[in-house]
Amino acid sequence: MSVVEVTIVPLGTGSPSVSQYVAGCHKILEQATDLNYQLTPMSTIIEGDLNRILEVIRQMHDTPFAAGAQRVSTTIRIDDRRDKELTMAGKIKAVTDKL
């Protein structure tokens, strides 16, 4: 299981607001019932099988183009741990246990 952070930024939209594009991307993510995710103020965190996550991110990346964006910049950070199970909640608990 992997934890992936993704930020999708539409460019060339004629407006500084991007929330409608983020919402469009999240509609794709909502359909991926095999993945867990968390929307944050600056990005989205997705938990699940890495190949499946990348497949869904590809669909999310294409969504702003379909909504009229002329350019899309997508940033992906992957945390893929193989020695034990990796989850969003586990990563947060590892830090809060030390506070």
Image: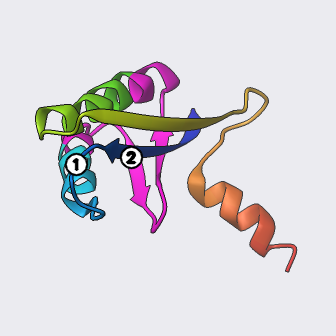
Q: From the image, tell me which residue sits under label 1.
A: 13
Foreground residue, 30 or 12? 12
Q: Does residue 10 belong to the magenta stretch?
A: no
At label 1, which amino acid type do we have?
Thr
Where is residue 41 shown, x and y percent of the image? 45, 68
Foreground residue, 13 or 36? 13
At label 2, which amino acid type do we have?
Val
Q: What element carries label 2?
A: strand
What coloring was used for the rendering? rainbow
Q: In which quarter of the image is residue 95?
A: bottom right
Q: From the image, tell me which residue sits under label 2.
A: 9
The local crowd at label 1, few if under 14, some if 14 to 19, many if 20 or more residues have their Cα within 10 Å, is some
Q: In which quarter of the image is residue 35?
A: top left
User: Is 70 above or below relative to 37?
Assistant: above
Q: Does residue 37 belong to the magenta stretch?
A: yes
Which residue lies at the image location 24% right of the left edge and 34% below the top edge? 70
Where is residue 1 shown, x and y percent of the image? 57, 32
Which residue lies at the image location 52% right of the left edge and 38% below the top edge? 75
User: Is 78 above or below relative to 50?
Assistant: below
Disc 2 from disc 1: Cα separation: 10 Å
Q: Is mark 1 on a helix, strand or loop?
A: loop
> How many dots with numbers?
2
Which residue lies at the image location 25% right of the left edge and 62% below the top edge? 19
Where is residue 78 shown, x and y percent of the image? 62, 34
Where is residue 2 shown, x and y percent of the image? 58, 34
Of the two numbered discs 2 and 1 in the rendering, the one whose residue sits closer to the viewer: 1
Left or right of 86, for residue 4:
left
The boundaries of the magenta stretch are 28-54
> Among all residues in the image, which is located at the extreme left?
67
Which residue lies at the image location 60% right of the left edge and 48% below the top edge? 87
The local crowd at label 2, few if under 14, some if 14 to 19, many if 20 or more residues have their Cα within 10 Å, is some
